[in-house]
Amino acid sequence: MFPEQLIKPENVLCNARARGKKHCLEILSELLAQSSPDIANEEIFSRLIERERLGSTSLGRGVAFPHCRVSGATQSAGALIRLSESVDFDSGDGDPVDLVFGLMVPETVDKSHLDDINWITSCLDDEALRSSLRDANNSRALYENFIAGFRRLAAESGESQLGQFGNIYHRVLKNRKSL
């Protein structure tokens, strides 16, 4: 999935204030619900909490990736939050979290959804992308920095590491340049 299909500007919030992990997941569920108005944010919140009980979704280095399956979702939908103050997310490295990328996927997950998950975690592991997200001072800049970082990583990683997704994405990029 192309980043613009996965996350929309209205699903990004910069300088959010969360009292803790649970409150952060509440905010995230509200953002994710905007992608699928037929799904109540309470349902998404419940699913995020269920997933978090299985183990922390913190990736370390101040980043968390809460994700869940939601009945009624027809495609992957993402949301991004940069917190004004870090919160404890039960991280393996002990670092509090200030960057949170949430993802909801359909109840039945296929290869494309797994590809979305793998690609997002790869992007969030990139130090330059994390730094640019932390440098954003408003939601629009946060969104634009995420999209720009995604494109940069896709171009740098080459088709062999991105598989079919990367092949398609690189073809689209080449076609846009030739137009």
Image: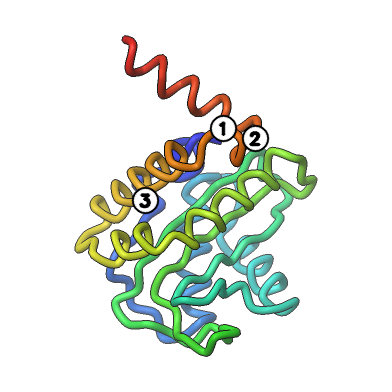
**Which is in the foreground here, disc 3 or disc 2?**
2
Q: Are marks 2 and 1 in contact (CB under 8 Å)?
A: yes
Residue 163 image label: 2
Q: Which residue is mark 1?
A: 159
For marks 3 and 2 on the same chain, the one whose residue lies earlier in the sequence: 3
Type of residue at label 1? Glu
Image height check: is 154 above or below 11?
above
Image height check: is 123 above or below 158?
below
Which quadrant: the C terminus?
Answer: top left
Q: Which of these two is toward me, 77 or 173?
A: 173
Residue shown at 67%/38% (left/top)? 74
Q: Position of residue 57 (x, y in %)?
A: 61, 72
Residue 146 image label: 3
Type of residue at label 2? Gly
Give the SS element for disc 2: helix
Residue 12 occupies quadrant:
bottom left
Q: Which of these two is toward me, 59 or 50?
A: 59
